[in-house]
Image (spheres, rainbow, N blue to C red):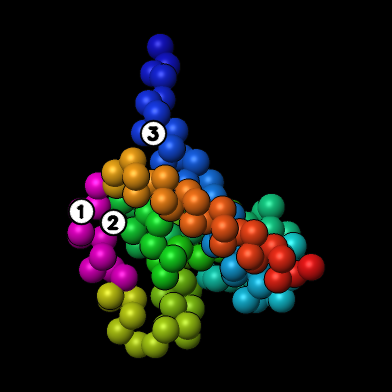
Amino acid sequence: MKRKKTEYQKLKADVWKLFSRFVRLRDCLRTTGTTTRGKCISCPFEYPIEKLQAGHFVDGRGNAVLFDEECVHAQCIQCNTFKHGNKAEYRKAIIDLHGHGFPEILEARKNKVKLFTVPELEELKGYYKEQIKLLEVTNE
């Protein structure tokens, strides 16, 4: 029997959906200058935004890095899912974006514990809705 999602779980899932959209829009604009296509961070290929996912550099979707903008980037399904993040290439891309030593900073964040409150999730939901609007306007 399938368990019914709690309101908290639903809110967290709603925030993830918005965060994922934000990451993909941000990275499409950064890599191609449009909101419709973008490059995967860990391979040389370009994809329609609908074919990109929000992939975590640090394994696991624990709360400490779940909504970490520096730790999540647009990835193709091949790299994110089938290559389990394509970590070696992802690491190179993180170094290109932020410099040497930054991958270790991100990896250290995984060990932190973050328990989101309902007000924090509501705030994130509003923030990412607004950020998405701003990014979409950028491309008009």
Label 1 vs 2, first from the N-terminus = 2
Disc ID at residue 64: 2
Q: Quadrant of the C terminus?
A: bottom right
Range shown magenta: 106-115
Circles 1, 2 touching at the beta carbon (< 8 Å): yes
- Pick the quarter of the image with the N terminus: top left
Look at label 3 and name its amino acid. Answer: Gln
The kind of residue on which mark 1 rests is Val
Name the foreground residue: 40 vs 43. 40
Q: Quadrant of residue 36?
A: bottom right
Q: Residue at x 64, y 66 (%)?
A: 135
Q: Magenta stretch: residue 109 in it?
A: yes
Please tell me which residue lies in front, 64 or 88: 64
Which residue is farthest top?
Answer: 1
Question: At label 2, which amino acid type do we have?
Answer: Ala
Q: Main secondary structure of the magenta part?
A: loop
**Which residue is rendered at x = 43% and y = 60% of the image?**
56
Q: Which residue is mark 3?
A: 9
The answer to whether residue 47 is above or below residue 138 is above
